[in-house]
Each structure stands twice: as C-alpha cells, then as structure tokens.
Image (cartoon, rainbow, N blue to C red):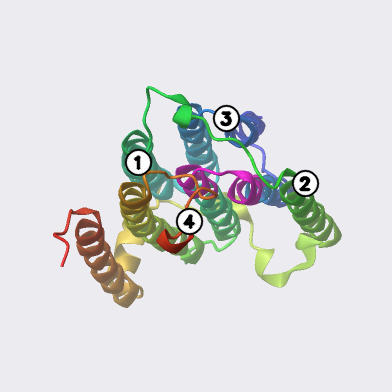
Amino acid sequence: MLFYIFALLAILSAAYLVLTRNLLYAGFSLLVTLLSVAGIYVLLFADFVAVVQLMVYVGGVLVLILFGIMLSSRVHDKSVLSESVNKGWGISIALLLLVGLVYSIGQTSFNTLPWLQGNADDVLGLQKSTVQSIGIKLMTDFVLPFEVASLLLLIALMGAAYIATDKPKV
Amino acid sequence: MEQIPLEHILILSAVLFSLGILAVITKRHAVVVLMGIELIFNAANLNLVAFSRHDSSLLQGQLFSLFVIIVVAAEAAVALAIVLRVYQHFKTAYLNQIVGDEHKS
C-alpha cells in the first residue's frame, strides 16, 4: 500500500516536472520525485541506498541544480520560464518507449527465472540492516571500483572547478 | 508486510524513464535537460535495487546502484560547470538559442 502511494507521488511529480514551464517548480518537483524514490528503496530492503540517495541527490545534486538555475537565468525577466520544443516527436518517442517497455514487462514471466526463485523476504536474514554487509563488500569484492570511484570524483572535482572559473583570455 | 510484485516496480521505473526521455527531448533549458537525465538515472537505479532484493546475500544490485549514484554526482558537477560556462559565453542557457560566433550577424 505504501509502495503505491510513493509510486503515485513519484509519477505525478515527474509528470509535473515535464509539464511545468517554471524552472524552479521543476526543481522542487524533482525533489519530491527523489524523496519518493528513496522511500521505495526503503520498502525494497535497501536502507543504505536510500540514505545515500537522500544525502547525495537531495543534499548534493539538487542543490547544485538549484544553483545552476539561479546562476544561469536572469530572474527579473521571463527567462526562468522554459517552453517546450519538439512536442510531437518527444511525446511519440516517449510513448513508444513506454508501450514497448510495459509490453515486454507484461510478456516476461519473472516467476520462472531460476535466479529469482529465492524468497525475497529474508533478504536481511538475522541482521536488520544492509550497512554491515555493504561495508564488508566494499572493502573486499568491490575494492577496485571503490578506488576508481574515488579517483573519478577527484577528477570531476578538479574538472568542474577548472571549467567554472574565469580564465584570462590568452 | 506483503510482497511488492516485481512487475509493478519495473512498470514504475519504465514510466519514470519515459518521462525523463520526454523532458530531455522537449525542454529547451539546459538545466531541465539535466533534470530529465537525473530521472533516467533514478529509473535505472530502481531496477537495480528491485532485482537486488532477490539476490539474498550478495547485494550486488545495491552496490551497483551506489556506484551509479557516485557517477551521477560527478556528472552533475561537470555538466553544471559546462552550463555555467555556456551561459557566460553565449548569455543564454536555452539550447535552441546557442549559435556560433560565425552565425551571429
């Protein structure tokens, strides 16, 4: 029941993001979408991913997007509005994708897949959270992607700072 | 607590993905296009976490979605820096008003 409330919230706010012309309204409806997706993560036994979603998306990416809106538009004129273009093509491509995806999901019988047979209720087992096993896995099986991710974040930090600063014209 | 059917989660993420594609195609402002890309990433993450529920002890889907979130953070920072440079250079962030210097009369 809670899942359907969160799903309805996510779909409605994402649709409002697409429909609205105001940039700030779009940003705040993206906030509602991200929060309801975090709620769905909690319902899917992924508490650590939900907390990371809250911290990185809502605390980081969304604030960055709001700063991008404020810095890249003059608020006193009409430029915080964003009209739509390519409406026919966009709606037809998105509808085609949606119908194809829903049709293929409906055609697939997930219950017969052998690796989905495991009962999903005791995913946590005796421990009540996934934090400990995620930490152990990050330091053993996934240590190479973990370090590569830290390198990627460092490169992105330096690249963003280099791009965004004012350089003297040479 | 009753089990959430896998198909419903997949259909939800398909709807979010289509709305993200719609935002990417139809919106003119570069920041709203970035928001559409965030919607697409969220749809992909939802699929990963939904299938990870059946992977009882390995948690590979959740770890993969964590790395996806890291890549999204890096992408958003660099993309917004590029949007700011474009705004400073062309004095607009609307994608259909950006024209090169040689086309300006």
**Nearer-N-terminus badge (1/3):** 3
Check the picture and name the quadrant holding the N terminus of chain B: top right
Kindly state the secondary structure of the residue where label 2 is placed: helix
Question: Could you give the CA–CA distance between mark 2 and mark 3, rounded to whole angstroms?
Answer: 17 Å
Circle 3 marks a residue in which chain?
A: A
Give a yes or no on whether discs 1 and 3 share a subunit.
yes
Question: Could you give the CA–CA distance between mark 1 and mark 4, rounded to whole angstroms?
Answer: 21 Å
Q: Amino acid at mark 2?
A: Gly
**Nearer-N-terminus badge (2/3):** 3
Magenta span: B19-36
Q: Amino acid at mark 4?
A: Val
Circle 1 marks a residue in which chain?
A: A
Residue depth check, mark 4 versus mark 3: number of the one nearer the observer: 4
Picture quarter containing residue A8? top right
Kindly state the secondary structure of the residue where label 1 is placed: helix
Mark 3 highlights which residue?
A21
Q: Amino acid at mark 3?
A: Arg
Confirm whether the magenta stretch covers residue B25.
Answer: yes
Q: Amino acid at mark 1?
A: Gly
Q: Residue at x 79, y 53 (%)?
A: A102
Mark 2 highlights which residue?
A88
**Main secondary structure along the magenta-highlighted residues:** helix
Circle 2 marks a residue in which chain?
A: A
Give a yes or no on whether discs 2 and 3 share a subunit.
yes
